[in-house]
Amino acid sequence: MALTWAESYLGRVRASVGDTDTIFFVGARTLVLDDQNRLLLIQRSDNHRWAIPAGAMELGESMQDCAVRELWEETGLRATSLTPYAFYSAYTYTNEYRHTYQQVLMNFVVHSWEGELVRQTEESVDAGFFALDALPGGKSFIIDEALADLATFQATGRLVMK
């Protein structure tokens, strides 16, 4: 069962330091492309933006474990093979709640998975696979960068670092 925000490590840290300080957000994102090269997106329940499955690490997890858990929590799919392709540590982001985070994130491309897609979860109100030239409106700003960084990784064989 997924933790609530208040129960999560990041939720407990945020409650401890308050709303105004910048804190680290350490987590993972997953890029899932099906055999038709369609991208898996979720429509987040908090802001209704379309996004790739992602979230914060919990204590004791590896970034890979985090990626697998977040994909499962948000879509019902369990990654069985995945590769890190990009690492981000220079971005600072302020969300809708005016919480500011310096992000430390690993992006993974998922090669295979098991399970059936669940379109609604506690963290998503919809989910689906979309053609890259027909992504839904209201999408997260990070999708284009994630796709571009995957193309760079595939062309160079080197982890993208930003």
Image (spheres, grey):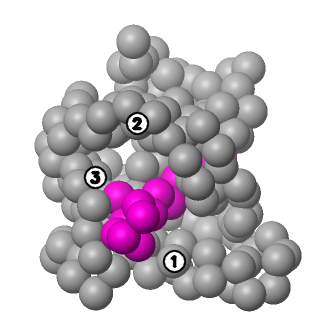
The disc, 3 or 1, on the residue closer to the chain's N-terminal end is 3
Can you say whether 96 is above or below 63 in the image?
Answer: below
| Residue at left offset 81%, top offset 85% | 156
Magenta segment's dominant SS is strand
| Residue at left offset 58%, top offset 54% | 111
**Dot 1 alpha-carbon crowd within 10 angstroms: few under 14, some 14 to 19, many 20 or more:** some
Q: Disc 3 and disc 2: Cα gap in Å?
A: 12 Å
Number of the label disc, if any, that sits on residue 77: 2
User: Which residues fall within the magenta stretch?
Assistant: 24-40
Can you say whether 1 is above or below 62 in the image?
Answer: above
Number of the label disc, if any, that sits on residue 147: 1
Q: Position of residue 23 (x, y in %)?
A: 62, 46
The mark closer to the camera, 2 or 1, is: 2
| Residue at left offset 28%, top offset 87% | 133
Q: Disc 2 and disc 1: Cα gap in Å?
A: 20 Å
Q: Which secondary structure, mark 2?
A: loop
Image quadrant for the C terminus? bottom right
The disc, 2 or 1, on the residue closer to the chain's N-terminal end is 2
Q: Quadrant of residue 83?
A: bottom right
The residue that mark 3 highlights is: 42
Q: Position of residue 68 (x, y in %)?
A: 56, 36
The amino acid sitting under disc 3 is Ile
Q: Which secondary structure, mark 3?
A: strand
| Residue at left offset 23%, top offset 55% | 128
